[in-house]
Amino acid sequence: MITNESDVKSRILLAAKKLFASQGFDGTTVRQICEEAGGANVALISYHFGGKENMFAALFDAYFPSQQFADVDKDLPPLDGVKLVISEVSKFRYNDPELVQIIQYEILLNTSRIDKIRYYVMPLWQALRKWLEVGREQGVFQFNSVDVTVYSIAGVLLFNRNSEYWQAIRSEGPHTLDYTIEEMTHFILGGLQVKL
């Protein structure tokens, strides 16, 4: 039985993150979360979080690197800003694939929880958009639609490349984070027609 209050809360959040990533929010019960958390009492969900919906928000409060993104200098030169987004999103995907899976699932289903995700994630995409617009004005980047360009970059960065679906065509082993960042940077900057 779990006794330490902060340990219980942390275990519940980790269990919820794991189960929401694998089963979806709606497919996960409070009882399953508590069982996954080592037999935590179901009443602790209400005590610590005020219910399952609030626990979803608490996941982002606890695990999304919002302060790291908030501290980014929005006045970076456009090329540096785009490279930073590529690097930070890749690190986030690598370090917390479960939270990324939750974000993707919720966006795909356009659930009622999407506003919570927007609150945390949208500042990063807004910064990317600004850097792209400024970079295009300065002649650093060449593209037609800023919307399509933002969607394309987000898709490349967030797409789940490790699912079983792709195993039939995969010919290379898993890549390191540094290699992935390098390849993503090369690919995205190539699409933006940056002369390297």
Image (spheres, grey):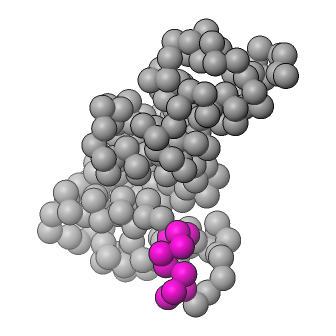
Membership of 167 in magenta stretch? yes
**Residue in view at x 45 percent, y 54 percent:** 85
Q: Quadrant of residue 64?
A: top right
Q: Is residue 6 visible?
A: yes
Could you tell me which residue is drawn at 28 percent across and 58 percent down? 150
Q: Is residue 158 magenta?
A: no
Where 144 falls versus 86 (above or below)?
below
Q: From which residue to which does the magenta span run?
A: 161-170
**In the image, 189: left or right of 17?**
left
Residue plotted at (44% across, 23% down): 53
179, 175: nearer the viewer: 175
Q: Locate residue 52 relative to residue 178 in the image: left or right.
A: left
The quarter in which the N terminus is drawn is top right
Q: Is residue 193 above or below residue 79?
A: below
> Which is nearer the eye, 63 or 91?
63
- Image spot of residue 162 (x, y percent): 55, 69
**Residue 115 in picture, x, y percent from top left:** 32, 31
The residue lying toward the viewer, choosing from 165 and 148, is 165
**Quadrant that contains the C terminus:** bottom left
- Number of marks in the image? 0
| Residue 77 visible to the viewer | no
Please state the horizontal and vertical placement of residue 59, each as a whole percent of the image: 55, 31
Q: Is residue 18 left or right of residue 74?
A: right
